Amino acid sequence: MIRTFSESEFLFIVASARWTLLLTLLSLLLGGLLGFIVALARTSQLAPLRMLAAGWIGMIQGIPVLMLLFLSYYGLSMGGIDMPPIVAASVSMALYASAYLGEIWRGSIQSVAWQQWEASAALAMSRAQQYRYVVLPQAVRIAVAPTVGFIVQLVKNTSIVSIIGVVELARAGNLVNNATFAPFKVFGTVAATYFIICWPISLLARRLEGRLNARRSG
Amino acid sequence: MPVVQVEGVRKSFGAVEVLKGIDLTVERGEVIAIIGRSGSGKSTLLRCINGLEGIQAGRIEVSGHKLDASGRGLRELRKDVGIVFQSYNLFPHLRVGENIMLAPRVVLGVGRAEARQRAEEALAEVGLGERFDAWPDNLSGGQQQRVAIARSLAMKPKVMLFDEVTSALDPELTGEVLATMERLAEHGMTMLLVTHEMGFARRVATQTIFMHQGKVWEVGPSEQLFGAPQTPELRQFLGTGLK
Ligand SMILES: Nc1ncnc2c1ncn2[C@@H]1O[C@H](COP(=O)(O)OP(=O)(O)O)[C@@H](O)[C@H]1O
Ligand SMILES: [Mg+2]
C-alpha cells in the first residue's frame, strides 16, 4: 500500500536529523580530542611520536570510512561488547575525523612562522608554554576555515552509517521514499534538512574568522 | 666574574665547521661589537651563546650558567640572556603590552601587576611608553624592533645580544633603533652586538671583534681596531665596508 507524503512523514524525516546531529557531535568531540593529540604528536620533537602519528593518519586516510564502520561494528560486537549501532557508528566516524582533523591542525601549527618558536624559546619558554601561549593561538586562526569545511563534510558523510541500521537523516528519507514513492518531496526534504544543519556552521565560521582577524589589527 | 665567557667553541653544520675555536669574554657593563663578512659565523656565535644552536666542543658560561654539549640548564641560562634578531618576531596575536608581559608572567612567574610595571618601564626605556595597547601590525618596523628590545628587557637579562637588528630597516628608522641601543649602553646594559653600522660600533662599543672564516681574527678597543687595523683581512673589510 502506498502512503501519501503527509505531515507525519515530513516530521519523521526532520526528527531523524537528531541522529545525524548526535553522530556529528560525538565524532567531533571524540575525533577532535584524538585529532588534537595526533597533531601535537605530529609536530613533536620526538621522532617516534611523529612517526606514530604519521602512521595513524596514513592508515586511517587509506581505509574507506565504510570499512572503518564495519570494523567497529563487527569488531566490537565480536569482542563480546554488545552495543547499539550508534556507538559503533560514532567510534568509526571519530577515528575518521581524528586523522583528518589531526592533519588539518598539523598543517595549521606548522604554518606558524618558525621565528615564533625561536623568539619564544629565546625568552626561556618551555615547549608547552610555546604551544600554549604563542603557537596554538596563531594556529587556531589558520585552522578555522579548513576545520569548518571538514565538519560540513562530516555532517554529510554520517549518512554512511545507515548501512548498519542507524536511522539517521538519509536512511529515514530512504524508508519514507520506499513507502510513498514521492522522491522529489522526500529527498527535497532530506536535502533541505542537511542544508539547514550545514549552512549555520559555515556562517558561524565566517563570523568567527572575521572576529579573529579583526583582533590583530583593530 | 665576566658575564659571558666563551672558550674554544666549535660549531659545525654537517661537515662544515662554522665556528673554529672561539674565545671571548664580556665583562659587566661592556659593549662589544662583532663585525665581519656575511657568512663569517657572527649570527651562529650569538645563537650558540643562548643555546639556540648546540656546540660540538668548548665551553660557554653566562652569569654562572654553564652550557655544554649536553644542553642541560638551557632555560635557566636563557632567563639571563636577551636576544633580538633582524626580524622582530613579535607575537602578532598579542598587543604590545601583552607581548612584553608574557614571558615574565609565564616563565618567571611574576604577578600581573609587576609584569605590567616591568612592561611599562621597558617600553619607556625604548621610548614607546604610549604604545602599550597597540597591535604589532600597526607599528612601523623601527617601533616593532624597539618593542622586541623591550620584550627582552622585561626579563631583566644580565646581557643583551643583538643580531643585525637594524638591517631590515629603512635608514630613517635605523637611527631610532640605534639611539635606543645607545641609551641602553649608557644605562649600563652589558651588550654583545653584531652590526654593519661601523660608525655606531666605533662610537658605542668599548671593544670590537672582527670575525673572519669562523675565527676571532682581530680584537681590540674599538678606536684602535677601526683606527689602526692590524691584519690585511680587516683592512680590506673596512676598506670595502666603510666608504
Ligand atoms: N642552520 C644552518 N644550517 C646549515 N648551515 C648554516 C646554518 N646557519 C648558518 N649556516 C652557515 O654557517 C655559516 C655562518 O653563518 P652565519 O653565522 O649566519 O654568518 P653571519 O651571521 O656572519 O653572516 C654560513 O656559511 C651559513 O651558510
Ligand atoms: Mg648573520
Image (tube, coloured by chain):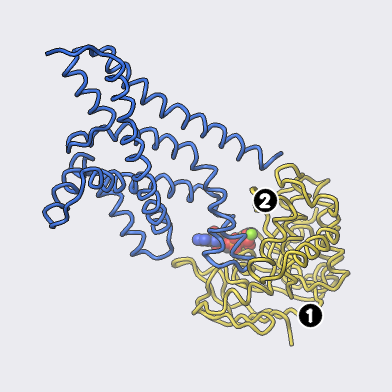
Chain colours: A blue, B yellow
Q: Chain of mark 2?
A: B
Is residue B202 rendered to the left or right of residue B193? right
Quadrant placement of the C terminus of chain A: top right
Label 2 sits on a secondary structure element that is loop
Residue at 61% across / 80% down in the picture? B60
Q: Which mark is residue B28?
A: 1
Q: Nearer the viewer, residue B30 or A182?
A: A182
Is residue A14 rendered to the left or right of residue B144? left
Point out residue B118 in the picture as x, y percentages from the top left corner.
79, 65
Residue under numbered circle 2 = B94
Q: Nearer the viewer, residue A170 or B238?
A: A170
Q: Nearer the viewer, residue B48 or A126?
A: A126
Q: Is residue A24 above or below residue B183?
A: above
The answer to whether residue B240 is visible is no
Give the Cα distance between marks 2 and 1: 33 Å
Quadrant placement of the N terminus of chain A: top left
Tell me which amino acid carries mark 1.
Answer: Arg
Residue at 27% across / 19% down in the picture? A9
Q: Is residue B3 above or below residue B179?
A: below
Residue at 40% across / 37% down in the picture? A151
Q: How many other residues sit within 10 Å of disc 1, few (<14), some (14-19) or many (≥20)?
A: some
The answer to whether residue A180 is visible is yes
Mark 1 and mark 2 in contact (Cβ < 8 Å)? no
Point out residue A181 in the picture as x, y percentages from the top left corner.
18, 13
